[in-house]
Amino acid sequence: MPKMKTKSGAKKRFVVRAGGSIKRACAFKRHILTSKTTKTKRQLRGTAEVHSTNTAAVRRMLPYA
């Protein structure tokens, strides 16, 4: 049986942590930053965890992670 393919977009966007949770980047921080407040931009720094309702879908996209 052939290997399953990993979704290329998913492997660039998600990282599976050692405990099994999935790390993702925050949205809304790419462009039109002049109209966003400093507080908003500061709170969007760093990473977040994929919500439990979306975890199964992300795992299907990353079969070997």
Image: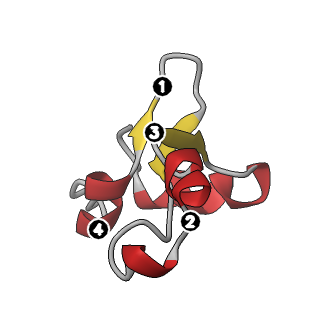
Amino acid type of the residue that numbered disc 4 sits on in the rendered structure = Gly
- For this orientation, the residue located farthest to the top is 18
Earlier residue among tags 1 and 4: 4
Residue 9 horizontal/vertical position (percent): 29, 68
From the viewer's perspective, is residue 16 above or below residue 43? above
Mark 3 vs mark 2: give the one in front. Answer: 2
**In this figure, which residue is indicated by the disc labeled 2?**
37
Marks 4 and 2, how far apart in space? 29 Å
Provide the secondary structure element on which disc 4 rests. Answer: helix
Residue 54 horizontal/vertical position (percent): 68, 60
Marks 1 and 4, how far apart in space? 18 Å
Amino acid type of the residue that numbered disc 2 sits on in the rendered structure = Thr
Earlier residue among tags 1 and 2: 1
Pointer 1 local density, CA inside 10 Å: few below 14, some 14–19, many at least 20: few
**In this figure, which residue is indicated by the disc labeled 1?**
17
Marks 3 and 1, how far apart in space? 15 Å
Count all numbered tags in the image, as a single digit: 4
Residue appearing at x 35%, y 56% in the figure: 13
